[in-house]
Image: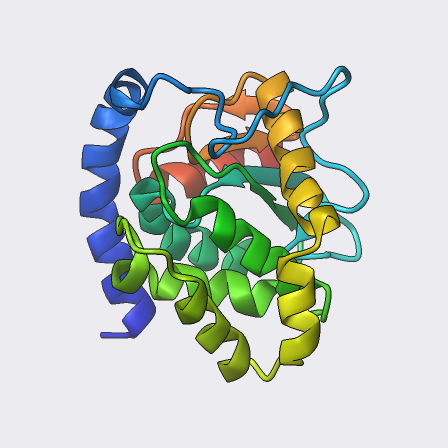
Amino acid sequence: MSKLKKQLIVAAVLLAGFAAAFGSYLLLAPDDRSGSGGLDVQPAAEALPVRGNSHRLTTPARSELTIVEFLDFECEGCGAYYPVVEKLREEYGDRVTFVARYFPMPGHRNGELAARTAEAAARQGKFEEMYTKLFTTQKEWGESQDWKQDVFRGYAKELGLNMAEFDAALADPEVAGRVQDDQRDGLGLGVQGTPTFFVDGSRIQPPGSYEAFKALIEDRLSG
């Protein structure tokens, strides 16, 4: 059995529970439910699901559909969807544009730091590699009250990043601002929790399984 198939089986179990508990997560979240990661972020006046500088995980020559995920690297639900999205990317990457946007949630100690880590890696052309690293190691650092900057710096070293440039980017207000720009769009679009998906600009209920997500894509592509 392949590693990805095992991940999909685990994801199916997690997604079933996540779909049932999604509304409860919003009710049980800290009082600051803005999705700002503890920062004072206001909704964008003209919010868009995807922008020119949004991180595209696939870039088909002729895109027939765009799927945008507002995500938090520390969110267990996002971690459960990760192998599902990866499998869908394998199958539809030549037809569908998959986009990842930052939306670190309050109550996650390292969610905003993880987003800045990914953006700092993006400055060196390594967004996708860091995106993958953060999700595949989530169980090692997520849901911790300890500050994980040293752990994330270790990932940057593993990916061969220039560490002086990485450290400078991690501390750069423009990098933090880039994360907040995604949050502003999310807030303006009514995003309240993660993951939240938009398909061709319309928000959808997160599908409860890989099969359900695949069926949704097939329906849109054939429509």
**Where is 163 relative to 57, above or below?**
below
Q: Is residue 93 visible?
A: no
Residue 9 pos. (x, y %): 22, 56
**Where is 93 relative to 42, above or below?**
below
Choose top left, top right, bottom left or bottom right for residue 199.
Answer: top right
Location of the N terminus (image quadrant): bottom left
Choose top left, top right, bottom left or bottom right for residue 52.
Answer: top right
Q: Is residue 178 visible?
A: yes
How many numbered callouts? 0
Answer with left or right where residue 166 lies relative to residue 24. right
Location of the C terminus (image quadrant): top right
Residue 207 pos. (x, y %): 37, 33
- Point 31% across, 60% down: residue: 141
Residue 90 pos. (x, y %): 51, 62
- Point 48% across, 34% down: residue: 37
Residue 5 pos. (x, y %): 28, 65
For the residue pair 141 and 131, the one nearer the viewer reads as 141
**Where is 210 relative to 59, above or below?**
above
- Point 35% across, 17% down: residue: 31
- Point 67% across, 30% down: residue: 49
Q: What colour scheme governs how the chains and residues are painted in the rendered image of this protein?
A: rainbow
For the residue pair 208 and 186, the one nearer the viewer reads as 186
